[in-house]
Structure formats: C-alpha cells, structure tokens
Amino acid sequence: MSTVTVKARSGSIKGFSEELTSFSVARLYEKVASKSKLPIDQVKLSVLGPDGKHKPVANDSTLNEYFDAQSLSGEVVVYAKDLGPQIAWKTVFLLEYLGPILIHGLVYAVASYAFGVEQSQTQKLALFLAVAHFVKREYETLYVHRFSNSTMPFFNLFKNSGHYWILSGINLSVFVYSYSRQHLAAAGPLAKFVFHVNDLPPVVNYALVLLWAFAETSNFITHVKLSGIRANDSKAYAIPYGYGFDWVVCPNYFFESLSWLSFALLVGNWSAWLFLVISSSQMYVWALKKNKRYLTTFGDEYKKLRRAKYIPFLF
C-alpha cells in the first residue's frame, strides 16, 4: 500500500501518516494546516534531496514531481515546518512606502509652520520628488507588481520598513527641510555641513527634475515589462527583453539609482548621498544575484546577450 508520512520540523506541527490517495500537494498543505490548527500560509513543506538538504515543495505542485514511481508505490516522507506569523508581501510593501510619504510631509510641515523655516525652491522640489517617488511605488504595489510568494515572516516588516522609514524618511527629511538659507548662513560650521542644501540656478534645478522624471518613468516601464512575464503565472520565469533590458541585467535598479542620483545632485546634502550609496549597493548585489540566476537557468541563451551587470555599457 502506498503511504505518505508527514514529519514535523517544528513543535507546533502535527505529523501523521496515511494512505496515499492523491498526488496533490495542495491537499497535503490543507491537511497539515488543519491538523496543526495553523493558517495555511504559515506551513512550509519540503522533501530531502540527494544531498540531504531540504527542498521546498510548492503548494501548486504534485508529489510525482519530487518522487519517482517506485517511491510512490511505497512510503514517501514529506517534512512540515511552521514558518511563524506571516504577513502579505503587498501589505509589507504598502507600509514600507507609506512611511516616507508621511515622514517627509510631517517634517516639512513642522519645519515650515511650527518653526517658520522658509523653504527654498530646492527644498520644495525635494519634497515633491521624494513623495512622488513613493506614491509611484504604492501604485505599482497595488496595480503592477506580481508576487511569486503571497506572504513573508511578519517580523520582516520591521527590518524592511526600517530601510525606508529611517534612511529615506527621517534621514532625508530632517537634514533637508530643517533650515532655511538665511538661518543656515548664521549657523556654525557643523550645522552648515549637516543641513546644507544646494542653491542652484532654477534652470539647473529643472534639468535635474527632468532627469528624475525620465528615470522614474523608465523605472515604471521596466516594472510593467517584468509584471507582464507573470501575467498568467505568478511564478513564471523568463529572460526579459525590450526597454532597458537589452543594455543591463536589471534596468529597474539602474533607473532607480539614476532617480536618486538626480535627487542627490539637486539637494547636495550628505544624507541624500548616503541613501544613494546604500540603496544602490544593495540593488547592485541583487542585480549580481539575478544575473547568476539567469546564467544558471538559461545558460548560453542568456550569456550571449552580454548584458552589463548594473550600468549600461560599463559594468
């Protein structure tokens, strides 16, 4: 008789063994969740690979994708783990991007109306660019992005949000909006450095805004193209082509860096350069990982494209 045994990898999981009447993995997920009294998104099934390491088992797969016919005629063993409290990816993204929108607006309002800071054209443009960037990200989360996984561990919310709320929210807003040019002129050398904001000619400001708009629009186009790959299958994986993708592995990352570069050039404050360096460094690491995955998955088909890793035509 064919049997399937579920072994627990967490104390909260209830293992069991039963006759194998269906190859459906979804049915196993439902049964483990029901017996363990856990939300189904909190359960992760796996099988042991030839190397002795656990290999994830997808909810929408079947057991014959992981076991041969001989194994399925006897006993197959599946392992179950409790991932802990989960939160939807979309919810995390929405909260991540909401923080900077609220923080920039609040700090600008407090500095302007509570402390009487007369904001310059540069500071007003900085507020617009920062808020518009994250409003765009909120829109993309709701209507563009397609997530291959529905949830992530709940506590990742705090780690992910910290980057945006602190580095691009508090960090940028406090040091860009806190002083007017007049007040800063009378301040000490440390304050002049910490709260410095450029005072460029209007034509230069508007040129940088145009560069920012080009980068943001291009970033949006690449996100739409990536979303199109998963229009019918949230887990679809393919080599993207077209706008930006013929030049570089992840043009969405490149265009985002270009957007924040234009912001840093506009304001000239150290906090903007810090955020540019940290965010671009992280995206560069992601681009290298994406490039490695393309090479592993598609081999020579991808290698012959000779795409730059991060900056078109350079590296």
Image (cartoon, helix red, strand yellow):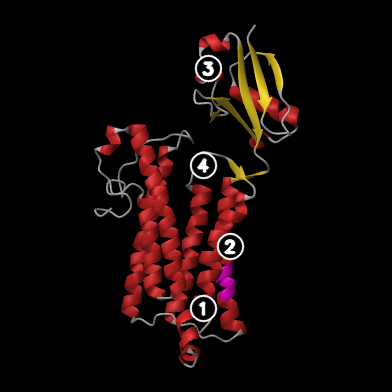
Amino acid type, mark 2: Gly
Query: Could you tell me how far apart the alpha carbons at marks 1 and 4 are, in whole angstroms?
Result: 36 Å
Amino acid type, mark 1: Tyr
At mark 4, the secondary structure is loop
Which residue is depicted at the point 59% across and 72% down? 106
Pointer 3 or 1: first along the chain? 3
* Stretch of the chain drawn in magenta: 103-107
Pointer 1 or 4: first along the chain? 4
**Marks 1 and 4 in Cβ contact (< 8 Å):** no
Query: Could you tell me how far apart the alpha carbons at marks 2 and 1 are, in whole angstroms?
Result: 17 Å
Pointer 4 or 3: first along the chain? 3
At mark 3, the secondary structure is loop
Q: Position of residue 78 (x, y in %)?
A: 61, 23
At mark 2, the secondary structure is helix
Amino acid type, mark 3: Phe
Query: Could you tell me how far apart the alpha carbons at marks 2 and 4 are, in whole angstroms?
Result: 21 Å
Q: Is residue 268 magenta?
A: no
Q: Position of residue 63 (x, y in %)?
A: 56, 19
Task: Name the residue tied to disc 2.
Answer: 99
Task: Name the residue tied to disc 3.
Answer: 67
Query: Could you tell me how far apart the alpha carbons at marks 2 and 3 are, in whole angstroms?
Result: 46 Å
The disc label shown at residue 246, or none: none
Outermost residue toward the top in this view: 1
| Mark 4 nearby-residue class (10 Å; few <14, some 14–19, many ≥20) | some
**Marks 3 and 1 in Cβ contact (< 8 Å):** no
Outermost residue toward the front in this view: 51
Q: Position of residue 66 (x, y in %)?
A: 52, 20
Task: Name the residue tied to disc 1.
Answer: 177
Task: Name the residue tied to disc 4.
Answer: 147
